[in-house]
């Protein structure tokens, strides 16, 4: 049919056909009693049995019954097919957490290593790194905790919370170095070294004046073979070696303290830059959390007391890649690990900031 130059299908004007109503089968929802899975297993269905042990393990873990949870996770894992990688990862992670809270660190690391080998994309790898981070935090291994956070910020360079956690760890390192410096070896007013504690004397290098004497009896025995001049020269040489050793130790401690200070500053500044960029897109409790985090960052920087010129220098270095278009292009969520290259934290971040600081100081 053609009306006013427009063509219509004749079927449009036909009477509607009678629709045949097909009755739907009745559906009765299954009603489960609370903690139904804690009852005795009566089914022979492996999938149903697998669910039962998985639910039991999760419940025991929530109640902090870690040994019972570990046993149920192990039973469940034996029922999961090799090809069901999603459930396997979930159960293996539960096992690793149980091992962690049971104090079985080596077993937890073995499970984490297995999860790392089975990871196929960046989301899997992120979960493994977060799990390993939890393990090192539980056992108080700060150096390994820092190493894992470095990998996380390198994998997700625009995640402010990873940067904030890393900044907090560097701040702890700086304070620990500062505490050692305050309680360690210091110089007296006349230039003589004075140990901060008595234990430090036990770590002196061999051959020093303190370690060369074995008491009056040893001194008498030595006197039978050595002249008084030899003993005096030996004591003087031991004192010089002690002074050199103390001086080297103090210098190394100062370098480590300055390094931790700079790393803490750059991570806090990076966190502040990212939080400020995200603030315009946030609202409600998310925005409130952002504001609280920014306040914590400002307070930490006040404690670190970087000079204005240093603050500006680090801000420029840590904000060079913060461009909206580039941030979208560099998103790696869910990408395959094949060909993925995680840049080294030292090379990408610290070395560039350190060289810029050294250049500014030379000028």
Image: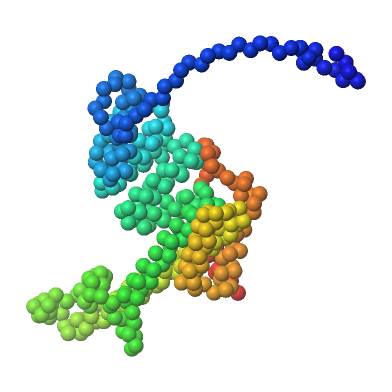
Q: Position of residue 325 (x, y in %)?
A: 66, 49
Q: Residue at x 36, y 40 (%)?
A: 93
Q: In which quadrant of the rendered view does residue 87 lie? A: top left
Q: Residue at x 39, y 64 (%)?
A: 172
Above or below: residue 184 compared with residue 103: below
For the N terminus, give its image quadrant. Answer: top right
Q: Position of residue 336 (x, y in %)?
A: 52, 37
**Residue 259 seen by the camera:** no
For the C terminus, give its image quadrant. Answer: bottom right
**Residue 75 seen by the camera:** yes
Q: Position of residue 156 (x, y in %)?
A: 52, 49
- In the visual, does 212 lie left or right of 80? left
Q: Residue at x 26, y 72 (%)?
A: 200
Which residue is outermost to the right?
4
- In the visual, does 341 lie left or right of 105? right
Which residue is outermost to the bottom?
190
Above or below: residue 11 compared with residue 258: above
Q: Residue at x 46, y 61 (%)?
A: 167
User: Which of 333 and 226 lies nearest the eye of the viewer?
Assistant: 333
Q: Position of residue 243 (x, y in %)?
A: 32, 78
Above or below: residue 119 compared with residue 165: above
Give the image's coloring scheme. Answer: rainbow
- In the visual, does 302 lie left or right of 117? right
Number of residue marks: 0
- In the visual, does 180 lie left or right of 16? left
User: Which of 180 and 305 lies nearest the eye of the viewer?
Assistant: 305
């Amino acid at each position: 049919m053609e009306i006013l130059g427009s063509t219509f299908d004749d079927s449009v004007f036909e009477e509607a056909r009678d629709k045949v109503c097909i009755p739907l089968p009745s559906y009765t929802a299954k009603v489960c009693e609370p903690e139904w899975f804690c009852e005795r297993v009566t089914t022979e269905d492996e999938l149903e049995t697998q669910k039962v042990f998985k639910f039991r393990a999760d419940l025991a873990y929530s109640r902090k019954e870690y040994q019972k949870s570990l046993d149920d996770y192990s039973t469940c894992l034996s029922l999961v097919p090799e090809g069901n990688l999603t459930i396997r990862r979930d159960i293996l992670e539960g096992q690793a957490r149980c091992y962690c809270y049971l104090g079985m660190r080596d077993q937890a690391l073995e499970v984490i290593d297995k999860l790392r080998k089975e990871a196929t994309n960046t989301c899997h790898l992120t979960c493994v790194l977060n799990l390993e981070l939890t393990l090192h935090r539980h056992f108080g291994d700060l150096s390994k905790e820092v190493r894992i956070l470095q990998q996380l910020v390198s994998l997700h360079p625009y995640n402010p919370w990873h940067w904030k956690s890393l900044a907090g760890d560097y701040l702890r390192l700086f304070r620990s170095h500062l505490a050692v410096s305050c309680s360690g070896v210091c110089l007296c007013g006349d230039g003589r070294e004075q140990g901060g504690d008595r234990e430090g004397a036990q770590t002196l290098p061999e051959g020093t004046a303190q370690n060369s004497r074995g008491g009056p009896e040893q001194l008498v025995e030595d006197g039978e073979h050595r002249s008084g001049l030899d003993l005096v020269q030996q004591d003087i040489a031991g004192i010089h070696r002690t002074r050199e050793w103390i001086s080297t130790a103090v210098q190394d401690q100062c370098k480590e303290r300055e390094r931790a200070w700079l790393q803490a500053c750059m991570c806090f500044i990076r966190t502040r830059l990212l939080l400020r960029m995200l603030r315009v897109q946030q609202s409600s409790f998310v925005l409130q959390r952002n504001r609280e985090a920014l306040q914590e960052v400002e307070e930490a920087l006040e404690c670190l007391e970087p000079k204005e010129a240093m603050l500006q220098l680090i801000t420029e270095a840590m904000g060079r890649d913060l461009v909206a278009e580039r941030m979208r292009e560099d998103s790696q969520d869910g990408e395959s690990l094949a060909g993925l290259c995680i840049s080294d934290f030292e090379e990408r971040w610290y070395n560039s900031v350190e060289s810029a600081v050294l250049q500014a100081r030379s000028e």
